[in-house]
Image: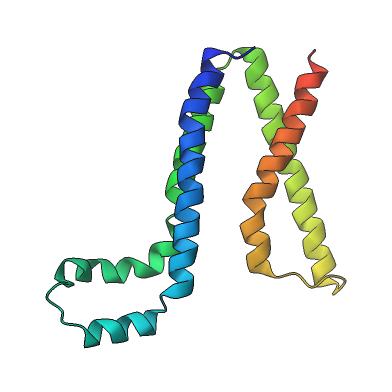
Amino acid sequence: MRTAASRHLTREFLPAMGAYAVVLLAATFALRHFDMPALRATLALLPLLPLLPLLPLLPLLPLLPLLPLLPIGFAARAMLRYVRACDELQRRIELEGMGLGALLLCLGSFSLGLLARADVLDVDGIVVLIWIMPIYVLLYGACKSVAARRYR
């Protein structure tokens, strides 16, 4: 049964995640195809008059990888509003799912770190950091379903 809170979450969360996917793909494309030295050389060679409105934005180019955080912030806000709008039982289920998911993520990442420190695994830290949030979301979903099953 879908409550008003879950319908409201869907209306807020899905557009935020769609925007996240678009912004992430665009930022990744831009970072791969626009090297900073090449961009500086292009700006030096082109007539500057048409580019004058863009010049104040050039110092912000290194912040391009952080652009996907904006829609993720909207998704997090939608999730927080959803939890606040839930009844007591649903709120407990959501928070148990979040807490258990966070605990499993911490245990898993700590174990991965120990294995990497012992040279059992070769782990790229950047890849690990990028995958923390998607793995947490999956763990949260699985733990939430386990918590919901406990209260049936």
Q: Quadrant of the N terminus?
A: top right
- Identify the residue at image location x=70%, y=36%: 140
Q: Quadrant of the C terminus?
A: top right
- The foreground one among 132 and 15 is 15
Left or right placement of residue 136 versus residue 5 in this view: right
On screen, 60 above or below 20?
Answer: below
Image location of residue 77, percent across then percent down: 47, 34
- Identify the residue at image location x=62%, y=59%: 130
- The foreground one among 55 and 63 is 55
Can the viewer see residue 106? Answer: yes
On screen, 8 above or below 45?
Answer: above
- Identify the residue at image location x=76%, y=33%: 143
On screen, 41 above or below 119?
Answer: below
Left or right placement of residue 119 versus residue 1 in this view: right
Residue, far left: 49
How many tags in the picture?
Answer: 0
- Identify the residue at image location x=60%, y=14%: 2
Query: Which quadrant of the structure image shows residue 50?
Result: bottom left
